[in-house]
Image: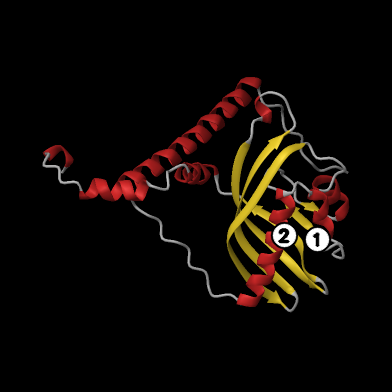
Amino acid sequence: MDERIEQPAEPAETALDRRELMARALGAALLGGLAMNEASAGAHKARAPVVYPPCDPELLAEIDAVLKRTEEIWLAQEWWRLPGEIWDRDDPSPMYVAEELYDVMIGWDVLDEYIFPEKKGLDAFRWGYSNLWVKELAPGVALALYDHWFEIKIKAPGPIGTPRHGFDRVLSLYNKKPDGWRQSLYAQCPLGPDTYVRAMAEKLVGEDFDEFYRKVQNKDIDDPRLK
């Protein structure tokens, strides 16, 4: 017996009002993020860098080598090498948490279709990483935390085919195999919408801004409006 209670249909006007409210709330959050970023920039408050606990330098070098190979594969546009060189094909339940999908992908039947299709609709894809930190969870199992970025151009006419950029944090798990470390989990950890907007705005600031700021601060201007 189905014990679910059927809810009455929501009036069209109510549904529309709710969507409008959600859209306005999201817009306010994004604008608020930009405003917070502008306020921070005006006060020139630099964020302190994250300090990670020390990690095993040998393990760090070994996982870094896997990520460098991942980067090389993408730069060469040879994504079909990923299954044999990066992922652990002996793991019966690999996991991929993609930022653009609602559902987590588990198992090779799903991952092969998503990551390793016969053809990809890509004109070009560039991938890189930084700020790598690693931790051994158990003998032969390692966790990696790092930042990554990508530039992508898909095969499509019009605006959808315009190259775009994105960035994320990533958590990966690796299993130690006879021929090296192999990935069994790849989880993208995107920022919240307002935080992402602020981070994106920060990335657009020129590398010479600090020098410009120092010159502004050291300039001797005897004007009460600038006090």
Instruction: Give the mark nearer the N terminus: 2 vs 1.
Output: 2
Crowding near the residue tagged with mark 2, few <14, some 14–19, many ≥20 C-alpha atoms within 10 Å: some
Identify the disc placed on residue 69: 2
Quadrant of image for the N terminus: top right
Left or right? Give the position of 182 relative to 212: right
Residue 135 can be seen, yes or no? no
Identify the disc placed on residue 34: none
Between 38 and 13, the one lying in front of the other is 38
Amino acid at pointer 1:
Glu
Which residue is identified by label 1? 85
Q: Secondary structure at mark 2?
A: helix
- Residue 31 percent location from the top left of the image: 45, 35
Q: Badges 2 and 1: C-beta atoms under 8 Å apart? A: yes
Residue that sits furthest to the front in the current view: 76
Q: Is residue 3 above or below residue 169?
A: above
Q: Secondary structure at mark 1?
A: helix
- Residue 57 percent location from the top left of the image: 61, 76
Between 84 and 175, the one lying in front of the other is 84
Q: Marks 2 and 1, how far apart in space? A: 8 Å
Q: Is residue 199 above or below residue 72?
A: above
Residue 191 can be seen, yes or no? yes
Quadrant of image for the C terminus: top left
Q: Please tell me in which quadrant of the rendered image residue 38 appears.
A: top left
Q: Is residue 60 above or below residue 164?
A: below
Amino acid at pointer 2:
Arg
Left or right? Give the position of 17 relative to 65: left
- Residue 6 percent location from the top left of the image: 76, 34
